Image (cartoon, helix red, strand yellow):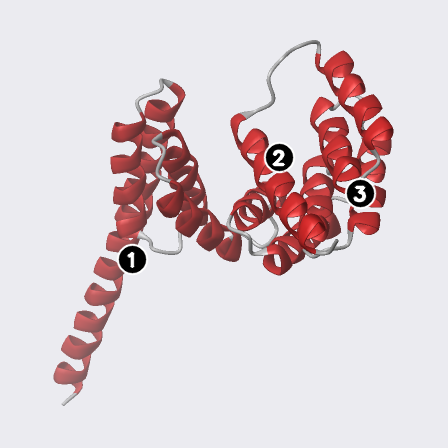
Amino acid sequence: MMRKRTVGLVSVLVLLAGASACSKDTEAEKRQRFEAGSKYFADGQYKEASVEFRNAIQLDPKYGEARLKLGETYLRLNQPQQAFREIVRAADLLPDSVDAQVQAATLLLLAGQFEDASARAKKALALDARNVRAQVVLANATAGLRDLDGAVQQIREAIELDPKQAGSYANLGALQLAQGKREEAEAAFRKAVEVGGGQPEPHLMALVGRRVGSVSSRWTCSDR
């Protein structure tokens, strides 16, 4: 009887050792896949990067960093629906990542999900109260929820945090234009050009500006 128990115990220990080794191998492989994807991404090889990030996620579906990078890769590949899914999922998996929360908030804003965008932006600001990107997204989400006065105040707070961001002035101008304050809007747009030095805004923020401007104009006109 003692011999059988000893054999059984040895078998269990062997199985546990094998499972531990397998787990370590999986962890190492998913990291290798992620690093390979990151290198492809840095080199502009986005299709190859997406393959490596997906491989990493297959090894660990809760690998938030890989989902975030996959989402960013889908943006470069002009696949917004896939990007939306991965980035929002990554934000769920990375609750302490300011960048993940801001990116998710931005895409939710673009999708017209203003309440969810606001919640994500506020979560980012709770982690980093001086995050200008989160403050701008929150302002635009507030505008989408038909609170232009609140949105203007939030944009002004973003400008106070960093007066050198041209996008903040452009957002302020768009909101003031929606309020019917044309002279103030024109001044804000001129300030955006001055601060930006003629440089174009990042791709994603340009999309946000067009989206918010369109939404604000539609509901402002319909209320007249």
Specify whether 31 is left or right of 19: right
Q: Residue at x 35, y 38 (%)?
A: 79
Quarter location, residue 182? top right
Q: Name the residue type under label 1.
A: Ser
Disc number lying in front (2 or 3): 3
The residue beneath circle 2 is 209
Q: Residue at x 45, y 43 (%)?
A: 68
Q: Earlier in the sequence, mark 2 or mark 3?
A: 3
Residues packed near mark 1 inside 10 Å, few (<14), some (14 to 19) or many (20 plus): few
Could you say where residue 186 lies in the image, as x and y percent from the top left?
A: 80, 24
The residue beneath circle 1 is 20
Q: Nearer the viewer, residue 127 or 153?
A: 153
Could you say where residue 133 lies in the image, as x and y percent from the top left?
A: 68, 37
Q: Earlier in the sequence, mark 1 or mark 2?
A: 1
Q: Earlier in the sequence, mark 1 or mark 3?
A: 1
Quadrant location, the N terminus: bottom left
Q: Name the residue type under label 2.
A: Gly
The residue beneath circle 3 is 179
Could you say where residue 29 lies in the image, as x and y percent from the top left?
A: 28, 41
Q: Residue at x 82, y 50 (%)?
A: 150
